[in-house]
């Protein structure tokens, strides 16, 4: 049975903020304990993918388990994590996430893709300023991105920055 009521939506203030600024910060969506479990799962997934000897799974390009090295910087990433981890597959359909997305784009929430990035301490590779919309244009301007940090991401660690 599909419930019509959302239990985990955004507040009216959060929706208004999104409409005015083009982003919203929803803190406390997952507990610290859940974040720790997801962090452990992402690191275990990275380890599994990086230890595979099949070059189609582990490569230097944008495929699952890729490790991009630039000078002494490091970035471990995986696209479409839901195909590699049951825990992360459940995460992307969790109502605490999907209800909030539906408040912004409406009830027809569809997944385009997922990405996992692990930036090791002191070696994490930066991302240059960019706009996701140009990479993934969509009718009705309803393409949104959700970023979930499983570690604290203060300014000193190079947190994500948003320009409204």
Image (cartoon, grey):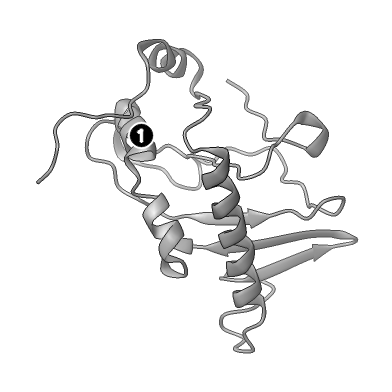
Is residue 63 toward the left or the right of residue 6 in the image? right
Which residue is outermost to the bottom? 53
Task: Point out the residue furthest to the right here.
Answer: 72
Q: Nearer the viewer, residue 111 or 97?
A: 97
Q: Position of residue 36 (x, y in %)?
A: 60, 49
Residue 91 against residue 75 in the figure, above or below: above
Residue lying furthest left = 1
Looking at the picture, how far across and down is residue 160, in whole percent? 67, 35
Name the residue beneath numbered marker 1.
101
Name the secondary structure under disc 1. Answer: helix
Can residue 31 be seen here? The reply is: yes
- Name the residue at 65% across, 72% down: 47
User: What residue do we see at 42% from left, 68% from top?
Assistant: 83
Q: Quadrant of residue 69?
A: bottom right
> Foreground residue, 30 or 128?
30
Point 31% across, 31% down: residue? 105
């Amino acid at each position: 049975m599909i419930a019509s009521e959302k239990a985990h939506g955004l507040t009216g203030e959060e929706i208004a903020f999104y409409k005015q600024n083009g982003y919203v910060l929803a803190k406390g969506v997952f507990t610290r304990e859940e974040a720790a479990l997801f962090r452990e799962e992402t690191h275990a997934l990275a380890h599994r993918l990086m230890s595979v000897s099949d070059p189609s799974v582990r490569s230097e390009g944008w495929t699952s388990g890729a490790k991009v090295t630039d000078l002494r910087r490091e970035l471990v990433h995986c696209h479409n994590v839901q195909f590699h981890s049951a825990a992360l597959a459940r995460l992307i359909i969790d109502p605490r996430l999907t209800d909030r997305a539906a408040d912004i784009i409406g009830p027809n929430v569809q997944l385009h893709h997922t990405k996992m990035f692990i930036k090791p301490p002191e070696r994490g590779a930066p991302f240059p300023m960019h706009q996701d919309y140009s990479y993934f244009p969509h009718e009705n301007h309803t393409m949104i991105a959700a970023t979930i940090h499983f570690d604290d991401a203060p300014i000193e660690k190079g947190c994500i920055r948003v320009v409204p």
